[in-house]
Image (spheres, helix red, strand yellow):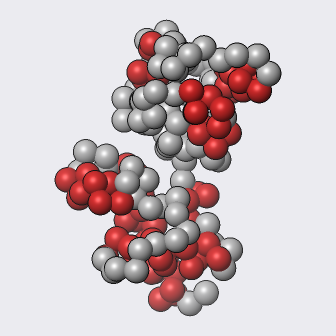
Amino acid sequence: MSSERLGLVALLFKWIWRFKTQQGALWVKIVKAIHGRQGKLDSNSLPSHSSTWLDIIKCTNQLREKGVHLLANYKKKVVDGTDTLFWYDVWLRDVNLKSIFPRLFALELKKDISVYDKVNGGLSHSFRRLPRGGVESSQMDSLISLLPSSLVVEGVLSGG
């Protein structure tokens, strides 16, 4: 890969990193208002109209097709859990929790709940009902075992 191309990849990743880490920034709020909470980062099909943000996403998708997965190298560090989305952000594993635990995610009433609020209120407090046997119970057990032991009652993650 040429140095010019590497520079472009670095610049793309910088904008994606900013999108993921600067949740309170006005431009991030605008992108989310137009393109959804994930900013179309999770989409392979994009609208036909053009914008700077969609151009960034298109380049990211083209790189992914060539084996360069920018988001695979991104994992959010949780400090107090207030600015990390429990289900959508990649913070525990290499994929978000909604993908690992789809049945629990389906029970969730507050899809945009933060790690802090989810843990502070109890894992099932924002579910429309408690998990029932089978897959739901299995996923709940797996989720509990996946959470770091450094998770404290106040919903703060230290370390991990």
The front one of 83 and 130 is: 130
| Whether residue 150 can be seen here | yes
Q: Which corner quadrant of the image does residue 105 belong to?
A: top right
Please indicate whether residue 105 sits to the left or right of residue 11 in the image. Answer: right
Residue 34 on image: x %, y %: 29, 60
Q: Give the quadrant of the N terminus.
A: bottom right
Tell me if 66 is positioned left or right of 134 in this view. left
Relative image position of residue 141 (x, y in whole percent): 73, 19
Q: Residue at x 31, y 77 (%)?
A: 51
In the figure, is residue 124 to the left or right of 24?
Answer: right
Q: Position of residue 62 (x, y in %)?
A: 56, 79
The C terminus, quarter of image: top right
Residue 149: where, in percent of width, then height? 63, 18
Q: Kindly tell me whether residue 142 is visible in this rendering.
A: no
Q: Residue furthest right?
A: 134
Residue at the location (51% across, 28% down)?
A: 108
The residue depicted at 56 percent of the width and 90 percent of the height is: 2
Question: Nearest the camera: 84 or 10?
Answer: 84
Up-down: is 5 above or below 57?
below
Number of numbered markers: 0
Looking at the image, which residue is at 31% across and 76% down? 52
Q: Residue furthest top?
A: 153
